[in-house]
Amino acid sequence: MYPETVILEEQGLRDGLQSETTLLPTAKKVELIHRLMEAGLKRIQVGSFVNPKLVPQMADTATVFAAVQQRPDVSLNALVLNTKGVERAIEAGFTHIAASISASDTHSRKNANKSLQEAMNEFENMVRTAKAAGMCVRGGLQCAFGCRYEGKIPVQRVIDLCKRHLDLGIDEIALADSTGMGNPRQMEDLMGEIVAMAGNIPVMLHLHDTEGKGLANLIAAMRVGVRHFDTAFGGLGGCPFIKGATGNIATEDTVYMLEEMGVRTGIDIAAIVNIAREMETILGKKLPGKIKNVLSTEK
Amino acid sequence: MYPETVILEEQGLRDGLQSETTLLPTAKKVELIHRLMEAGLKRIQVGSFVNPKLVPQMADTATVFAAVQQRPDVSLNALVLNTKGVERAIEAGFTHIAASISASDTHSRKNANKSLQEAMNEFENMVRTAKAAGMCVRGGLQCAFGCRYEGKIPVQRVIDLCKRHLDLGIDEIALADSTGMGNPRQMEDLMGEIVAMAGNIPVMLHLHDTEGKGLANLIAAMRVGVRHFDTAFGGLGGCPFIKGATGNIATEDTVYMLEEMGVRTGIDIAAIVNIAREMETILGKKLPGKIKNVLSTEK
């Protein structure tokens, strides 16, 4: 019923940090990426190519990437929201990008300054540009399970948008519960359909724990065949353009639960707990991940 | 696959408050119980009969109970840990008690000052005393899914103890993940067996969110037939005799998730959110429940 292994993609450097006002030095980001690779992460989103005035924390993504000592068994990617971002990613030397649009028109206008239709047109251009450069493209949908502005997103719209994404020749498809509004039943219903539709294309799920359902949703999606999940150390994260958005599911909590269930992640939990605790010191606040608190009391 | 309805038992007044050093006035507790009944809770644990020197917050349980305007459709119970507690509950007029022992010998010694064997003997005496007084007895096991001192609890021990409990003629059986160490796979494996073994006896599950798995565990247990869950407003709670123990799953988060999934609880979420927010003011701290934060941003 449960798989033997799952693959986690670390989002702490991008989704985790993007809303934080304490700017991490480039060297610290590079160090964290090295430590994450050492800890067993095989996929890491290292930053994004978005407007540096709106998201200053991500302004040094190209410099970070250039300084990382890459490993052949680890795939590093950057998030992009428009064709200019794709071009910047290509220039920086990335061979793997995550390009997504929002399933919610309102969120799309706030996050990408485009209507849903405009965003879809732009997405086609992004994929074309990236594929022409030989990139591996993770395509996807934000707010696939609900939007704080629009409420529920019609299931058929999500399926149609995923189908259009797949038809464009993307290499991987990711659905994001950006608001944490998704529930386990929705995960089972929708993700099962997406997995079936995607065929050999890997299906990824990006979960937030805003309403406390993050791990319940992960379990539900795992049951219907999802094998790739985004997580962030410490449970950091949240979109700057979503009301009340809070953290991604915490890498260390996810690893701990899965390993206890006999699902292998290949990730050294102690190393992630150390990073999460260090981030609490750097950012000067408690992070939402839980297992780090329990383990600390046992010291 | 999911049931049409589940029954939640509110634990905020007992498990929720027992470790809090801010003593709630008796009148406030009574008011909260009335509000919980009004909000649709059909089962409420209103307090406990334990050592008032060790757990001062519970010293007024008899007075609280006497002041409550009872309703025929709501069952109020008190927790007891020994025969003296049963006698105090009888004297106070309770007709429903929750009597449990720990599945962990070490936790039993710390929480009840008894070895596991001594606790089992005492439990038999408690059930005999309560049944002789015509009480409805909820029997159960604490730390059924793991212990901070002893680690994993052998599954066979839990099953054997449950069987002995059932043989004594208890009316309901409750398993508690007091430490939050349980995982969804364990819930599916163990709770399925307990449900089968219990037959017509209702099986209850008491979950803590210490490691962030609370709602994932609830979903897993619901899938194998559990229909009764303990929750606490705000996600308050934690045993004073368990290292690093944190809150119960939050009533309002649980209600919100279940209702979104089409599983009816009959509980007015706004009323519970109001109680949770008021408790944050009274106790002067942020409580772990999450949906209250999201709903507040939408005001």
Image (cartoon, coloured by chain):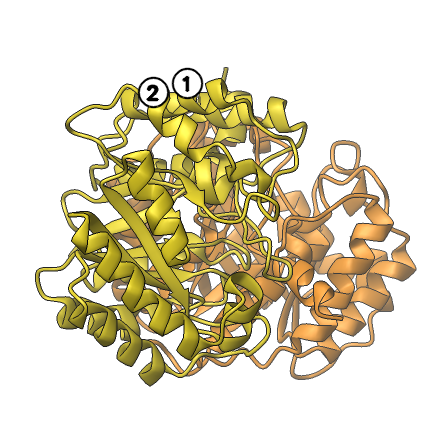
Chain colours: A orange, B yellow
Q: Is residue B144 above or below residue B174?
A: below
Q: Position of residue A241 (x, y in %)?
A: 60, 30
Mark number displayed over residue B31: 1
Give, as a three-letter code, the residue at label 2: His
Nearest the viewer among B216 and A225 is B216
Nearest the viewer among B117 and B247 is B117
Give, as a three-letter code, the residue at label 1: Glu
- The reply to whether callout 1 and callout 2 are in contact (CB within 8 Å) is yes
Name the residue: 44% across, 47% down.
B249
Q: Is residue A293 above or below residue A151?
A: below
Q: Is residue A216 above or below residue A72?
A: above
**In terms of image quadrants, where is residue B285?**
top right
Task: Identify the element where label 1 is drawn.
Answer: helix
Q: Position of residue A41 (x, y in %)?
A: 64, 74
Compared across the picture, whether B222 is left or right of B256 comes to left
**In terms of image quadrants, where is residue A13?**
bottom right
> From this viewpoint, is residue B16 visible?
yes
Residue that badge 2 annotates: B34
Q: Is residue A287 above or below residue A56?
A: below
Task: Identify the element where label 2 is drawn.
Answer: helix
| Residue projecting furthest to the left | B200
